[in-house]
Amino acid sequence: MPTDFNQQIIEEFRANRGQVGGPFEGARLLLLTTVGAKTGASHTTPLGYLPDGDRILVIASAGGAPRHPAWYHNLLADPQVTVEDGVFTYQAKALVLEGQERERLFARAVEADPGWGRYQATSGRILPVVALIPIFGPPAGPLGDALKLVHDAFRRELARIRAEVAASGSSLGAQLRVNCLTMCNNLHEHHSREDGFVFPALEDRYPELAEVMARLRAEHEVVQRLLEQLQTLLAADDLSPGTLLNEVNRLTGEVEAHLDYEEEYLVPLLNLG
């Protein structure tokens, strides 16, 4: 994309917490900041991405141009990059994928969006596939506000998956299944951390929360059962988009109600420090 157009996207992305309009409305976008290999200056580029478990994937398409984009050359020189996803800004390690892994994941990307294949054909080069592996530190600011940010990330991802399933047509591609499984795993890990660390600490400090904490734990169990049902469906060869959409809608309703209730009671207390 031209530099001035990129800058418009960057400004809109940052002003609206990752939401942009026009041709990229509803798309999975991030901002990738690399260090210039020659200049040493920071260089930020808006990119589409694909979930892939505990990492995300970006493809050095350069819109089908014959040369690799500048950001790709930069991360070859310095693989530590900064990622903005609209909710969080974090450091990540960039890993260029090779061989069969690269071929498998690029094929999955093309299945989800044939535009990647057209870009490769137009460019006359093999488009690099890069994994961005997050390097997470403790969230900045009050803990309650950080919890709200995490919840907002789940709300946004659930909305994206609903839209992707609804638009999937008569069959489900491998990338869409990965998107769903990644969301399931992330939500499970989040609830496990809450059950293991956050909830016990709050119960010790605020024994009057016993009834609230009991309800939150019970809701975690309900969500976990729905996650397990969803994962079982995703493993089926004959899964229909309509069936998956019904399950995603069920899960979304339970999760969003749970997040709202948790925030009502826990965010103010966590922000007390």
Image: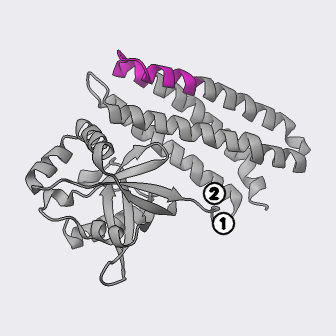
Question: Residue placed at 51% from the left, 63% from the top?
Answer: 90
Return the residue nearer the eye: 269 or 164.
Answer: 164
Label 2 to label 1: alpha-carbon separation: 7 Å
In the rendered image, residue 10 lying in the magenta stretch gets the answer no
Question: Residue placed at 34% from the left, 29% from the top?
Answer: 166
Query: How many numbered markers are drawn?
Result: 2
The answer to whether residue 91 shows anywhere in this view is yes
Question: Residue placed at 69% from the left, 44% from the top?
Answer: 193
What amino acid is found at the position of numbered circle 2 in the picture? Ala
For label 1, the crowd category at 10 Å Cα-Cα, with few meaning under 14, some 14 to 19 and many 20 or more, is few
- Write down the residue under mark 1: 141
Question: Residue placed at 45% from the left, 62% from the top?
Answer: 93
In the rendered image, residue 239 lying in the magenta stretch gets the answer yes
Secondary structure at numbered mark 2: helix
Instruction: Give the left or right position of residue 101, taking residue 272 as reference.
Output: left
Q: Quadrant of the C terminus?
A: bottom right
In the rendered structure, which segment of residues is drawn in magenta? Answer: 226-246
Secondary structure at numbered mark 1: loop
Residue extending farthest to the front is 99
Return the residue nearer the eye: 165 or 19.
Answer: 165
Instruction: Give the left or right position of residue 263, taking residue 153 as reference.
Output: right
Return the residue nearer the eye: 167 or 99.
Answer: 99
The image position of residue 199, as x and y in percent, is 78, 44
Rendered image coloring scheme: one colour
For label 2, the crowd category at 10 Å Cα-Cα, with few meaning under 14, some 14 to 19 and many 20 or more, is some
Instruction: Give the left or right position of residue 126, taking residue 172 as reference.
Output: left
- Sequence-wise, the earlier of marks 2 and 1 is 1
Q: Magenta stretch mostly in which secondary structure?
A: helix
Label number found at residue 146: 2
The image position of residue 59, as x and y in percent, is 28, 54
Examine the image and state in which quarter residue 8 appears. Answer: bottom left
